[in-house]
Amino acid sequence: MMIRKPLRLAIATCLLALGTAANAAAAMTVYKSASCGCCAKWVEQVQKHGFTVKVVNVEDIMAVKAKAGIPDKFASCHTTRVGGYIVEGHVPAADIKKLLAARPKAKGIAVPGMPMGAPGMEHGDHRQPYEVLLLKSDGSTSTFARH
């Protein structure tokens, strides 16, 4: 069966649009302090998992968190915007992909503090168990993942 040129063009346009949408979903902006080494390691980790990262070094990271609506008790050293969500702290790339695929009604996800062994916080074999929290729009949280 031969596909006519207009149909081929329409199919190609749709495939291009899907590819562009997928790439847009994988683009993130990370706000961090210029001197933070663990943030730089975290950025490398998400890039290895296919995310395109724009890094914005800021003087006052707490102001970024306040503007994003991140309560102090959930804060970490960097704040990320991706796919309409906030990702706070050392969240594994797989959990970000899970968030973007599931599209829950939420503000985003967070790993409060800086747990040893989380992406960007590796130090030999030392690991702390930690949770990735789903930050709901009403201010409540639930466990999104455990590591």
Image (spheres, grey):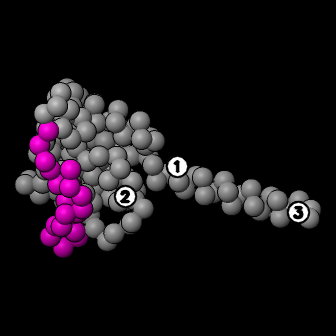
Report the side of 25 relative to 114 (left or right).
Answer: right
Q: How crowded is mark 3: few (under 14 residues within 10 Å), some or many (20 or more)?
A: few
Label 1 amino acid?
Answer: Asn
Identify the mark at residue 3; answer none if there is no mark: 3
Report the side of 32 relative to 45 (left or right).
Answer: left
For the point 92% across and 62% down, which residue is it?
2
Task: Estimate the x, y position of residue 135 in percent, counting from the top left.
Answer: 21, 63
Query: Which residue in the protein does label 1 denote?
Result: 23
Identify the mark at residue 98; answer none if there is no mark: 2
Front disc: 3 or 1: 3
Nearest the camera: 67 or 137? 137
35 w.r.t. 141: above or below: above
Label 2 amino acid?
Answer: Lys
Would residue 96 be visible to someone looking at this image? yes
Of callouts 3 and 1, which one flags the residue occurring earlier in the amino acid sequence?
Answer: 3
62 w.r.t. 56: above or below: below
